[in-house]
Amino acid sequence: MAKTVNLKSSDGHIFTVEEAVALKCQTIKNVVEDTGDDEVLLPKVNGKTLVKVMEYCEKHVKEPSGWDQKEVDEMKKWDMEFVDVDQAVLYDMIMAANYLSIAGLIELICKKAADMMRGKSPEQIREIFKIENDFTKEEEAKILTENAWAFE
């Protein structure tokens, strides 16, 4: 039987996860190695988000270096479907991935965010991500002039 770790979310839910899966999270790995505990408190990750993050870790725990192209393509497809969620879920996942230090998931979500911004104007990006424009018209004009190359 595989060794397990209990993960306690911020809302008090306890999830029993195979140790190999949990250790994909550098933060959890550090706690387990430093304390020897088999229960890790995660005060910054709610249960719903923890389930999603562990789903990613479980899928990526067995990543042999000798994958053939078909396996690589299947994983990329799975990854893109995994991050095809609403923005609130995506936000919670990036915050959890950052807190748990899961480099691959951080990279995947950042790629998704970049794809969402590609070809969009600053106004469209603000609308997508609900960002308030706190620049005056003069400040915005100056920034656009100084960085015109970025908007070509």
Image (cartoon, rainbow, N blue to C red):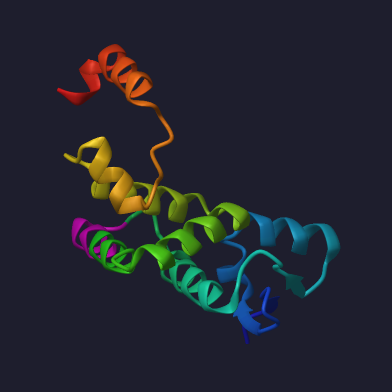
Q: Position of residue 111 (x, y in %)?
A: 32, 47
Q: Is residue 85 magenta?
A: no
Q: Residue at x 29, y 63 (%)?
A: 75
Q: Residue 66 appears in which quarter of the rendering?
A: bottom left
Relative horizontal placement of residue 138, taking residue 13 as reference (left or right): left
Q: Nearer the viewer, residue 63 or 125?
A: 125
Q: Nearer the viewer, residue 6 or 90?
A: 90
Q: Residue 81 appears in which quarter of the rendering?
A: bottom left
Q: Nearer the viewer, residue 105 or 48?
A: 48
Instruction: Name the outermost residue toward the right.
Output: 35
Instruction: Name the outermost residue toward the front.
Output: 137
Q: Height in image: 129 above or below 38?
A: above
Instruction: Name the outermost residue toward the top.
Output: 146
* Residue extent of the magenta highlight: 67-75
Chief secondary structure of the magenta portion: helix
Q: Height in image: 33 above or below 114?
A: below
Q: Nearer the viewer, residue 103 or 65?
A: 103
Residue 108 appearing in the image: yes
Relative horizontal placement of residue 35, taking residue 4 as reference (left or right): right
